[in-house]
Image (cartoon, rainbow, N blue to C red):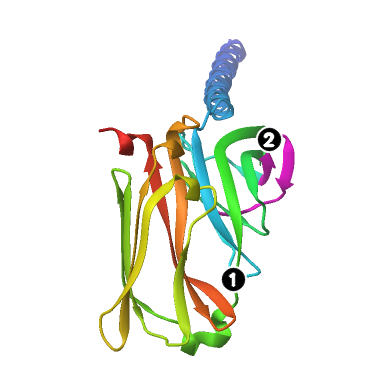
Amino acid sequence: MKIFNKLIFLTIFTVIFINGCSTKSENLSIKETSQSSEQNELYNKLRNLDVSNENHFIYNADSFEKKNITLTFTFAIENLDIDHISLYADKDEVMKDVTIINKEENKLVIQLNEFIPYFNNVYINLKNGTDLKLDVGEYYLEKFSMDDFSNYKSDLMTIEQYHDSFEKGKYNMYAVITKNDQSKINYILPKKTMPYIKNLRFTQKNLSDETVKYSLSFEMDKGIVSDKKLDEVYSEVALVQNFMDKRWTLVKSSISIRKTDFIE
């Protein structure tokens, strides 16, 4: 009788144990399926991105500097386990194994290891084997040959003050810079941006025996966004020091031009 009771107890315990394991397995399966479903939903959203932006950048060629570019998405990508990234111009690969500098929320900072004039897609290969082709807008890069100023530090002009703004289609910038009688300052803007600029003024004014104030202003034609029905255009502007037969950028900033800037 005791043996019979023990057998009944063992049978009940085994059934409970098996049912418990089955329930845990089912819960894990449901959780994994849910996570997989959420991942696939994010993948599909990223694949279907349609970005109506242009970027006009200055690339310092022949320079010790590397060009960092921030790619911004409408969805968080920080949890993507990225193996490697390649850049494409439509269907043509223009740069492989791009260096990732930072990945945070919906931003991905990459570094270009060489000059490329244009790209508009990125291919992201994830460690789980998934491949994503993403529209990132159009990136135009203009080559600018800049010298290494590390051997000319004593001749490098210093920026004491700098301010720029872009409001309602108008750009204003000023920079207070230390004097160097052997140097001249000029500005550079990307060629993709220049056709839309009007009423440009670049002036300089001596503030003291040691400093000069440089001012740059212009109006932006709304065609820069309306011609191609863009939402936004980013354009860089830079001040360049020309010292004898050498030149380098003293400061560079980015202008964000939105279609809403031209609504009256």
Give the percent coordinates (x, y) of residue 55: 51, 46
Mark nearest the camera among 1 and 2 is 1
**Circle 2: is it few (<14), some (14-19), or many (20+) Cα within 10 Å?**
some
As helix, strand or loop, the secondary structure at mark 2 comes to loop
Whether 155 is drawn above or below 87: the answer is below
Q: Which residue is mark 1?
A: 146
Amino acid marked by disc 1: Met
* First to last magenta residue range: 84-101
Residue 225 appears in which quarter of the rendering?
top left
Q: Which residue is mark 2?
A: 90
* Camera-nearest residue between 130 and 170: 170
In this view, the residue farthest toward the right is 92
Residue at the image point whose x is 54% and y is 52% from the top? 191
Q: Quadrant of the C terminus?
A: top left
How many marks the image carries: the answer is: 2
Residue 7 appears in which quarter of the rendering?
top right
Instruction: Compare marks 1 and 2 and give the one earlier in the sequence.
Output: 2
Q: Report whether residue 56 is seen.
A: yes
As helix, strand or loop, the secondary structure at mark 1 comes to loop
Q: Quadrant of the N terminus?
A: top right
Residue at the image point whose x is 68% and y is 45% from the top? 86
**Circle 1: is it few (<14), some (14-19), or many (20+) Cα within 10 Å?**
some
Give the percent coordinates (x, y) of residue 235: 46, 50
Residue at the image point whose x is 65% and y is 50% from the top? 117
Whether 20 is drawn above or below 77: the answer is above
Q: CA distance from mark 1 to mark 2?
A: 29 Å
Amino acid marked by disc 2: Asp
Question: Which mark, by number, is residue 11?
Answer: none
* Camera-nearest residue between 23 and 96: 96
